[in-house]
Image (tube, grey):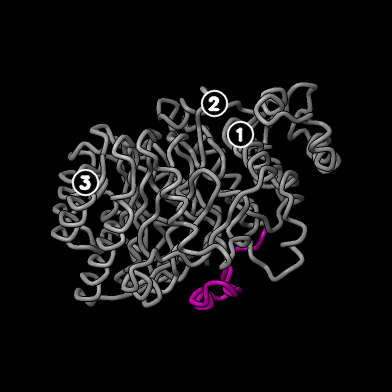
Amino acid sequence: MPSSFAQVDLGLLRKYDRPGPRYTSYPTAPLFSSSFTHEEYRQEILATNAPDACADISLYFHFPFCDTLCYFCGCTMMVTRDRNRIAEYIRYLKKEIDMVAPHLSTNRRVSQIHWGGGTPTHLTPEEILDIGEYIKARFNVDPDVEMSVEIDPRELTQRHLGTLRHVGFNRMSMGVQDFDEQVQKAVNRIQPEEMSLQVFKWAEALDFQSINIDLIYGLPFQTMASFEKTVRKVLQFSPERIAVFNYAHVPWLKKHQQLIRQEDLPTVEEKLDILKMTIEVLSAHGYEYIGMDHFAKPTDELCIAQKEKTLYRNFQGYSTKSGADLYGFGMSSISHFQNIYAQNEKGLQEYYKAIDAGTLATHVGYRMTYDDHVRKHVIMRLMCDLELDKRSVERKFEIDFDEYFAAAFPQMQQFVDDGLIDLLPDRIRIVGAGRLLLRNIAMCFDAYLDAMMKTKPVFSRTV
């Protein structure tokens, strides 16, 4: 990473810190509507799975249950220690699989599987084996499939990890957040450093191909000095990837976040100091900043894909599987392929009710327009490639780029003036600290943003 990028300008970060989308999708989820029905989703599945269909498939499975409540959590989750309740959910997940899998073309291979939550490792090893083998029996899974899982070290045993490897998982993401004891108590996530290190060593011994560690800055009682200790301890683990997320304090959306006192949170200035330190320390230790909170070693396939311009973004973050349609299973999961997004019911009983009725559990969705496709492509390439070939966009969509996006250029001028992007005749290039402001730059191309920002708050801050 260029040294000029590592020296972060706090003034610029402060200037652009505002609410904005994360662009795991475009259009973004607040635009999804209940007018998109389960029948429309079913018809789209059938329409995109002709016998000769051969595009790869990505599968996402949502496991909402956790053992305890982390006060910072922004996921769709619920706390339970009732094993019967978890077993019931797995039965319904299998039913949903059986409603979708038979309609997929047998020529289509599953190239990517991801388990998220909640906490997938709240399942017992026996449950992991059961649902893992069920999935592989119902889909045409590529022998070289990329299988990733989110894990919580606090209730994990070596047997859990061994079972995950046996099922075929070869990548894992481990939540650490912060090693500071005061911070852990404030967010109700007690996780000693020794526990995380033990799990990391187990994963290495089991030959997981890639291990990611998640950190969060902006949590209560964090300081630059305390978080630097956490960052340097994580560096001793030497994971392939490190994700450093900005804590999104949205108590109007996630009521349990009201358990975090506003006065205990770092100030905006303190958060920016923490971010600056984190970037400089990770950069100094050889990690490259991919974008959107993600760092990786230069040898990691995310870095390689970014250099080769084959990187992609979906609801799980950055990915190398750019051509795969995404099918989501479980409550709140989101599917995306071709022209549609479809999200399942967010409530457990509503999800069960739909499955019992023999219908797909679609709650909301969206059908993309031509303009959506154009803008999605532009936003995706900027966030993944850190530059945009205007002529390539013109050829792909048969438009005049400067004319089509005339309204975006005045918005981009401030980024040009601040040395964050270069506007060239044939391309737009993100430079220097512009990498830290990808969300802000992408917002210039969002046709729906102004209208959404006038309604109730729905987005976290960009820095």
In this figure, which residue is indicated by the disc labeled 2?
Answer: 309
- Answer yes or no: do the residues labelled 2 and 1 have beta carbons within 8 Å? yes
Q: Secondary structure at mark 2?
A: loop
Q: CA distance from mark 3 to mark 2?
A: 31 Å
Q: Which residue is mark 1?
A: 381
What residue is shown with label 3? 136
Q: Could you tell me residue 223's position as x and y percent?
A: 55, 58
Choose mark 3 or mark 2, whichever is in front. 3
Q: Amino acid at mark 2?
A: Lys
Q: Residue 71's x, y, as percent?
A: 45, 71
Q: Amino acid at mark 1?
A: Arg
Q: What residue range appears in magenta?
A: 250-268
Pick the front one: 87 or 117 = 87
Q: Indicate the position of residue 324 as horizontal and vertical percent values.
A: 43, 38
The residue drawn where x is 39% and y is 63% is 360
Amino acid at circle 3: Lys
Q: Which numbered circle lies on residue 189?
A: none
Q: Is residue 175 above or below residue 112?
A: below
